[in-house]
Image (tube, grey):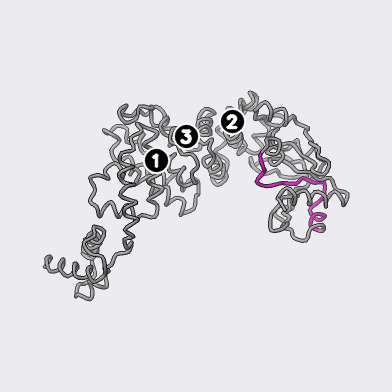
Amino acid sequence: MSLRELATRIVKTLQASGHAAYFAGGCVRDMLRGVEPADYDVATSARPEAIRALFPKTVPVGEQFGVVLVIEDGHQFELATFRSDGPYTDGRHPETVAFTDVEGDVRRRDFTINGMMYDPVEDRLIDLVGGRKDLEAHLIRAIGEPRKRFEEDRLRLVRAVRFAARFDFDIEPATRAAILELTPQIVTVSPERVAAELRFMLTDRSRAKAVRLLDELGLLPHILSEVSAMKGVAQSEDWHPEGDVFVHTLRCLEKAEDARWELVLALLLHDVGKPPTAGSKGFVVHEKTGAELADDICRRLRLSNREREVVVWLVKNHMRFRDAKKMKLSTLKKLMSEPLFEDLAELHRIDALASAGDLDNYRFVMGEYWKFREEKPPMKPMASGDDLIARGLAPGPVFKEILDEVYNAQLEGKFSDREGALRFLDDLLARRR
């Protein structure tokens, strides 16, 4: 049974028990756009206790707000009792809620295109805010008084940008004016919520438009001041005929096509070290400065340690392909052995395409990489510290120096098994003595 069929079954169950029940919000918007919704939310007159009595598997995720999850055939559906919100004092949650009718529920929602409901049993659209008209006109419009909507939940400032970029819609003038006025208040929103919106934006094909719109509306300096600082930072026209660092970064986002979160965030931040190093010739070690800034940004957004480590590594190493033809084979093989090598290669490819378009280094490295993969080389060193101890050496800093030399020889193909590794080690120790 499809998600829609399961959601319709839920609506039928509620209606059969005397409750009003409709599909609500984004799923209705997507249905009208001809897009299959990823999930279906249901708004109903039924109170949480009535919902729990009707369905065998439920999870009370926010009963104080009338929200209950219903589990059907392993899928979760959010059911919310019609409600109106009391005053907001924290820019996120209402102090109180009151259960109400369908019109009261619609009036509290964010944008008209998200404020429609649909009865799948009667095949009837319920549009009390002109959502369908705005959908056809390609407009993002706040429901009611825009300033009030944004003051209730300041994350809506960013959500307006996300929807406008994702659907390629314009923001209605009064709604846009309210965003411009309230832009500084985005700093009061928790970093986790902002990061979640950034994830939605950057993993969508409209990511460049979203960042451009964040900048136009004055939100970018408050969310990612380091990215905003790229504007006006000139680059060599030989390597970057496209323009300044900010323009180049937007082009990278445009070239990225579909990309996972960490990679596209690294693309956004890969040149974040250029503004602070702009006084040096060729932005010397901007990748090192950029990695430090990327680390700060990921911590500020409270990303997971894994996400942060991936982004920082990619930013720190994004210039490695530049010197690939001059690398020792062992150094290149070490780079190709990195778990994130393919992501790094994709970052370099996009970076090159977004500038002068020179893919020579990329083709060289990837040619070596596929040969390297065909060789199926052992990824782990064949000699260890235990071998040095067995030969009478005391553990110390010299261990790393010796083992690195043995591993480099391994990667360069000077031996292919453990016996060869130990012979090389013995010869090396004899030479050192």
* 149 displayed left or right of 397: right
Q: CA distance from mark 1 to mark 3?
A: 15 Å
Q: Is residue 230 visible?
A: no
Q: Amino acid at mark 1?
A: His
Amino acid type at image mark 2: Asp
Q: Position of residue 383 (x, y in %)?
A: 26, 68
Residue at 68%, 40% in the rendered image = 26
Callout 1: few (<14), some (14-19), or many (20+) C-alpha neighbours within 10 Å? many
Mark 2: few, some, or many residues within 10 Å (few <14, many ≥20)?
some
Q: Which residue is mark 3?
A: 254
Q: Mark 1 against mark 2, which lies toward the viewer?
A: 2
**Mark closest to the chain's N terminus, 1 or 3:** 3
The residues colored magenta run 35-52
Q: Residue furthest top?
A: 173
Q: Earlier in the sequence, mark 3 or mark 2?
A: 2
The quadrant holding residue 104 is top right
On screen, residue 392 versus residue 189, left or right, reads: left
| Alpha carbon distance from label 3 to label 2 | 14 Å
Whole-percent x, y for residue 381 in the image: 29, 64
Q: Residue sitting at 27 percent across and 73 percent down? A: 386
Asked if the stretch drawn in magenta spans residue 388, the answer is: no
Sequence-wise, which precedes: disc 1 or disc 2? 2
Q: Which residue is mark 1?
A: 270
Asked which secondary structure carries label 3, the reply is helix
Q: Which residue is mark 2?
A: 168
Mark 3: give few (<14), some (14-19) or many (20+) Cα within 10 Å: some
